[in-house]
Image (cartoon, helix red, strand yellow):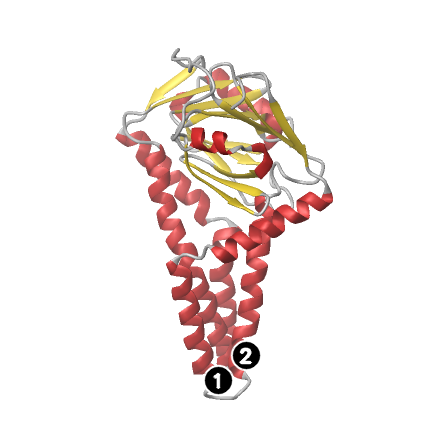
């Protein structure tokens, strides 16, 4: 394991590597299907059998488009995972900070990860899929050695002594039950009104309407199949709400700092230093600040939520000026 601050490993993504990253992500998605996906596949099979009883070609007419749609969804998910930080021409690097934390740097900012901040690192092809306690990302596999993975998962010590000094970020706020409730409510509303969330339900409603207007049962089967495919997403949404609530437990102290160059946010799972170029817009509710990330081609809609009480009035003005100047 390298000594802190002495070794920086970097990879610049070219077109060939980008295609390989996306392909490895698709392969990983196909290999690791949860039980709920098989439930959706079983429901789709039943729909196809039921449709085939009317006319012989109805079953394939229902199944083939849905299968192709699933493959397209997997490809788009892989492409959007590689859109932020792993696009063609972008550079990602890893290295050790002087305080013994592993630092991951890309165009979106800098992420400082202490020991045990990651639940799992799974290698797939040339990729390393990192599942953190408060963030998830994909990185070229050569940037994380086996020793690095052991450190992140908490199985091994770091390369040097870890500093125990308190946070140097200017602002702090202790999470109360009220703060947690408002964060979860605003985060839920932010997600359910996005096109990513609504698309399968709007599509199912459209096919159902066509079925009612044309009286062809195939459209109704397609609507049912889309709803079946949406079941895993609905389950993921429920699990995401639980995970989001767990990321802001009552009693945790959040730290943040707003400067003309960046927004820094620290939790017990690490520190994120995010450049203002990452954000497209800033808004607020009665209780929280919402920072909408700049969306790249095929990229997922992302919003960072932080309690309004974490910031001073001058911090809010700085947020508006920094993000507003980059729209």
Indicate whether 64 appears above or below 308: below
Closer-to-camera residue (316/174): 174
Q: Pointer 2: residues within 10 angstroms few (<14), some, or many (20+)?
A: some
Q: Residue at x 60, y 20 (%)?
A: 7
Indicate whether 73 appears above or below 251: below
Residue 176, horizontal then vertical, whole percent: 28, 27
Quarter residue 26 falls in: bottom right
Closer-to-camera residue (141/255): 141
| Cβ atoms under marks 1 and 2 closer than 8 Å | yes
Q: Residue at x 59, y 16 (%)?
A: 6
Q: Pointer 1: residues within 10 angstroms few (<14), some, or many (20+)?
A: some
Indicate whether 322 appears above or below 60: above
Q: Residue at x 47, y 76 (%)?
A: 221
Q: Which residue is mark 1?
A: 52
Disc 2 is placed on an element classified as helix
Direction from residue 276 to residue 313 in the image, left or right = left
Q: Which mark is residue 110?
A: none
Asked if residue 10 can be seen in this view, the reply is yes
Residue 303, horizontal then vertical, whole percent: 50, 37
Dividing the image into 4 quarters, which one contains the C terminus?
top right
Compute the Cα span from label 1 to label 2. Answer: 8 Å
Residue 234, horizontal then vertical, whole percent: 40, 55
Direction from residue 73 to residue 265 in the image, left or right = left
Q: Earlier in the sequence, mark 1 or mark 2?
A: 1
Residue 118, horizontal then vertical, whole percent: 42, 34
Q: Residue at x 28, y 29 (%)?
A: 250
Q: Which residue is mark 2?
A: 60
Indicate whether 10 appears above or below 72: above
């Amino acid at each position: 394991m390298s000594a802190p601050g002495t070794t920086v490993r970097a990879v610049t993504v070219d077109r060939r590597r980008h295609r390989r990253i996306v392909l490895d992500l698709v392969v990983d998605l196909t290999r690791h299907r949860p039980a709920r996906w098989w439930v959706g596949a079983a429901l789709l099979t039943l729909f196809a059998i039921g449709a085939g009883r009317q006319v012989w070609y109805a079953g394939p007419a229902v199944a083939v488009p849905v299968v192709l749609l699933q493959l397209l969804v997997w490809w788009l998910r892989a492409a959007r995972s590689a859109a932020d930080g792993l696009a063609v021409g972008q550079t990602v690097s890893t290295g050790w900070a002087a305080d013994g934390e592993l630092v991951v740097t890309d165009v979106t900012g800098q992420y400082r990860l202490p020991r045990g901040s990651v639940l799992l690192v799974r290698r797939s092809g040339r990729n390393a899929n990192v599942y953190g306690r408060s963030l998830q990302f994909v990185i070229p596999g050569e940037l994380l050695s086996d020793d690095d993975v052991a450190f992140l998962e908490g199985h091994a010590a770091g390369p040097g002594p870890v500093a125990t000094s308190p946070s140097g970020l200017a602002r702090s706020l202790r999470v109360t039950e009220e703060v947690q409730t408002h964060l979860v409510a605003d985060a839920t509303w932010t997600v359910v009104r996005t096109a990513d969330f609504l698309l399968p339900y709007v599509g199912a409603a459209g096919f159902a309407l066509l079925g009612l207007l044309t009286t062809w049962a195939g459209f109704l089967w397609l609507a049912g199949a889309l709803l079946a495919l949406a079941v895993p997403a609905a389950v993921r949404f429920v699990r995401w709400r639980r995970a989001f609530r767990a990321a802001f437990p009552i009693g945790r102290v959040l730290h943040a700092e707003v400067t003309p160059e960046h927004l820094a946010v620290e939790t017990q799972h690490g520190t994120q230093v995010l450049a203002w170029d990452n954000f497209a817009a800033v808004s607020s509710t009665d209780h929280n600040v919402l920072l909408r990330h700049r969306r790249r081609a095929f990229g997922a809609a992302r919003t960072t939520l932080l309690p309004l009480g974490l910031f001073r009035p001058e911090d809010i003005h700085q947020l508006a000026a920094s993000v507003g100047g980059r729209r």
